[in-house]
């Protein structure tokens, strides 16, 4: 078995905290370097004519919850959104996500990320936090609902991540801590405070190295802070680390080709959590995560994928030789 089990409750919910955002993706058909003059770096004033624009639903909480719903869960999102959130909210509702924990602020817009990418995959990014800046004002205890049995603290305003982790501990609600890109913004003390007592730390290999450096932990002492560590390795798969057992190594699922990797990590987390909700072994949890991520990278955007149970089972079987052992 997995070494981690949850109460068997048909109405049990995953509570997903984290960001809700819109992504504005623009594609520049040239290269930034051809238009930047080194001797004018002190006074840059450049306009790029883009050939493509996509507005996508995003944010870590939205991405994770959407894939969890595809996998048969009824996740509850606890996050902040703005006055422009109505259509996004309805999309989540239509796909089986519980939006009862979302605090909509009518005096500000939802967080928005503006990304311009050139032909060499260089990016210029501007991020407007919007309503996300108020996420620390939300109480997980008040918004988790009556059926919460597991939570994930995904990237958000750092104050919110600290508060959600603290309240999860106070509620004795098992939680996964997923700092992702915020691992670079948070100092060691803040990371320690937020991660303390987590059932799982979920990071990619680079983030894990940064996390350990900032928190001054090694491969043994990390387990004095968190119970288990899940490390994603991109095309190399993933691994689950525990204090007294060999690493559980999981190969990556088969894909037909990478179109857009955005949101793959969030989908992996959703698949892994879906396995935890049914007390599956860690290897199966990792395989579910990898298959869920495979569907994402083949589409533009972190919430453009969709599949039937049959399609998911077929890809899992093609990758791992048997059907997934979940309901």
Image: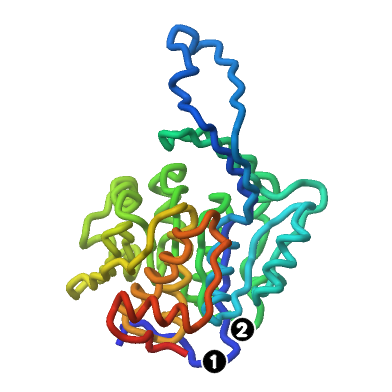
Residue occupying the point 32% across, 47% down: 210
Residue at the outermost right position: 106
Residue 127: x and y in percent read 60, 39
Q: Nearer the viewer, residue 153 or 163?
A: 153
Task: Decide which of tag 2 and tag 1 comes sooner along the chain.
Answer: 1
Please state, as top left, top right, bottom left or bottom right, where the N terminus lies in the image: bottom left
Q: Is residue 29 above or below residue 95?
A: above
Per the model, the C-alpha gap separating discs 2 and 1 is 9 Å
Q: Identify the residue position indicated by label 1 in the image.
A: 9
Q: Residue at x 48, y 17 (%)?
A: 36
On the image, the x and y values in percent for residue 232 come to 33, 60
Tell me if mark 2 has few (under 14), some (14-19) or many (20+) residues whose alpha carbon lies within 10 angstroms of its own: some
Q: Residue 47: x, y in percent?
A: 61, 22
Task: State which quadrant residue 112 falls in.
Answer: top right
From the viewer's perspective, tell me whether residue 186 is left or right of residue 4. Answer: right
- Is 52 on the left-hand or right-hand side of 123? right
> Does residue 315 lie above or below 213 as drawn?
below
Circles 2, 1 touching at the beta carbon (< 8 Å): yes
Task: Name the foreground residue: 118 vs 142.
Answer: 118
Residue 288 occupies quadrant: bottom left
Instruction: Give the image quarter of residue 93.
Output: bottom right
Residue at left offset 44%, top offset 58%: 297
Q: Position of residue 3 (x, y in %)?
A: 31, 83
Please, what secondary structure does the residue beneath circle 2 have? loop
Vertical placement of 270 versus 284: above or below? above
- Residue at position x 77%, y 52% in the image: 84
Left or right: 5 as drawn, with respect to 14? left
Disc assigned to residue 147: 2
């Amino acid at each position: 078995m997995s070494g981690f089990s949850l109460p068997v409750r048909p109405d049990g919910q995953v509570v997903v905290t984290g960001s809700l955002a819109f992504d504005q993706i623009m594609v520049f058909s040239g290269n930034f370097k051809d238009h930047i003059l080194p001797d004018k770096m002190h006074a840059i004033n450049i306009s790029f004519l883009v050939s493509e624009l996509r507005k996508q639903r995003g944010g870590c909480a939205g991405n994770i919850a959407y894939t969890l719903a595809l996998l048969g869960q009824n996740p509850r999102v606890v996050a902040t959104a703005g006055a422009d959130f109505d259509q996004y909210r309805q999309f989540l509702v239509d796909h089986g996500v519980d939006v009862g924990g979302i605090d909509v602020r009518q005096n500000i817009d939802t967080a928005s990320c503006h990304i311009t990418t050139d032909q060499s995959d260089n990016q210029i990014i501007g991020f407007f936090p919007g309503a996300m800046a108020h996420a620390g004002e939300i109480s997980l205890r008040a918004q988790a609902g009556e059926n919460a049995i597991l939570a994930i603290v995904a990237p958000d305003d750092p104050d919110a991540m600290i508060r959600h982790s603290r309240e999860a501990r106070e509620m004795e609600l098992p939680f996964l801590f997923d700092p992702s890109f915020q691992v670079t913004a948070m100092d060691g003390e803040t990371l320690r405070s937020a991660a303390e007592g987590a059932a799982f730390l979920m990071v990619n290999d680079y983030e894990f190295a940064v996390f350990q450096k900032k928190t001054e932990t090694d491969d043994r002492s990390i387990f004095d802070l968190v119970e288990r560590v899940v490390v994603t390795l991109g095309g190399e798969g993933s691994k689950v680390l525990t204090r007294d057992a060999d690493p559980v190594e999981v190969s990556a699922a088969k894909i037909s080709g990478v179109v857009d990797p955005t949101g793959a990590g969030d989908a992996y987390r959703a698949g892994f959590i879906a396995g935890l909700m049914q007390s599956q072994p860690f290897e199966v949890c990792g395989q579910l995560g990898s298959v869920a991520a495979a569907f994402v990278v083949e589409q533009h955007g972190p919430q453009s994928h969709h599949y039937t149970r049959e399609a998911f089972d077929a890809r899992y079987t093609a990758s791992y030789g048997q059907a997934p052992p979940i309901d």
